[in-house]
Image (cartoon, helix red, strand yellow):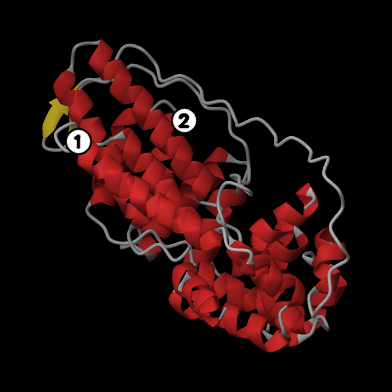
Amino acid sequence: MTRRSLLILAALLLITGLLGWRFAQPVTRPEVKEQPRIHVAGRRIEPPKSPAPKVSPPPPMKADTGRPAAKPEGPLARFFEQPDKLLKLTPAQLQSYLASNKRNAESLLAAMRLTGDIEFLREAAKNFPNDAAVQLELAFRSGIPGERRRALDALKRIDPANALSDYLSALEHLRAGNPTAAFDDLSAASAKGLINDYALPAMQSAEEAFLAAGFTSVEAKAAAMMGLQRRQVEPLRDLSKQLAALQKAYTAAGDTTSAEAIRQMGHALGQQAQFGARYFIDELVGMNIERQFLDPANASARQQELKQRTDYIRSLTGSPQWEALMRQGSAAEITLFVDRLKLYGEEAAIRWLLQRH
């Protein structure tokens, strides 16, 4: 199988390891500056004198030199032949979709995602400033630090139960050299519930946009699934690395109490990323974060639990039924799979598929 086929399959299955999602705008990570004494987790600590090291991006994947795969068949054949072209739409293709939805916030966000034109997002931000999904996209995609900060503050106000806004805000504060505010955000996030990136509405609106552009029903469903973006993955990974560096600096400075407070914050981040995760990429990222901040008292037992869960996920996603479904499956079966993924999550959809074969 060629590298191209592997990448397409990875996008279809939403599996980590083969495909990554990056934060929209790369931001230079400034050093964490020395600050006055800080209140964290009910006590006062001092930031370490040593700044957190900068995190380098992972190296690019090497090209595959294998033989080309056989020409795909089935209702999704053209997705394997021209995936880049078919997962993007032009503004002209989106006109009827935008008109039928009165250019509401959801349709403008779909247009922005499917064209890559941030002007659709700016229109949504201007006309729908109290829409949580709009503010989250602005926080992800804006290259202006002040604009990102305003978007995150607005998201905290609009959806106060969403821990994602606090975690993204903490990362922004650490990058700006303000650990005091970052620790406040981390403490607030640990007391909240789920991390919500509003993925389901995004997937549904993308499907509707593809239908309006003339795609068949099964093509629209597959395209919406293939194009689903997990934009919070990279920021949460970056945040965990920043926290690990801070913990190390506290330990090196002999402040083990403050180091333990940071460990607890990182552990909470890892567990929240797993809790209620609908997609394996989110759960796997959460497990990797948790591994960095395990309690030494039960680290061995928890490591074993995390390994068993990781092995189980790999056993589900390593089945050849995946490629068979997407390359040769019927339109009806592909439709059912995508619908189940939206309703019940990735694990339940995969188990349903494997039970059928």
Instruction: Give the spatial CA distance, label 1 vs label 2.
Output: 27 Å
Q: Can you say whether 3 is above or below 14 in the image?
A: above
Q: Residue at x 51, y 71 (%)?
A: 350
Q: On residue 75, which mark appears?
A: none
Most distant residue in the front direction = 357
The answer to whether residue 130 shows anywhere in this view is no
Q: Quadrant of residue 261?
A: top left
Numbered disc 2: secondary structure: helix
The first of marks 1 and 2 along the sequence is 2
| Number of other residues with Cα within 10 Å of mark 2, as a class: few under 14, some 14 to 19, many 20 or more | many
Q: Does residue 60 appear to the left or right of 140 in the view shown? A: right
Screen quadrant of the C terminus: bottom right
In terms of image quadrants, where is residue 178?
top left
- List x then y, in percent, for residue 18: 63, 48
Q: Secondary structure at mark 1?
A: loop
Depth check: give the residue in front, 186 or 272: 272
Frontmost of labels 1 and 2 is 1
At label 1, which amino acid type do we have? Asp
x and y, in percent, of residue 266 in the image: 30, 38
> Which one is nearer the viewer's eye here, 101 or 61?
61
List the residue tagged with mark 1. Answer: 295
Q: Is residue 17 left or right of residue 64?
A: left
Residue 121 in the image: x percent, y percent?
65, 61
Whether residue 304 is visible = yes
Can you identify the residue that label 2 sits on?
175
- x 18%, y 31%: residue: 296
| Viewer-proximal residue among 30 and 79 | 79
Above or below for 343 versus 277: below
Residue drawn at x 39%, y 36% as measured from the top left: 240
x and y percentages locating residue 133 in the rendered image: 51, 65
> Do labels 1 and 2 touch, CB within 8 Å?
no
- Look at label 2 and name its amino acid: Arg
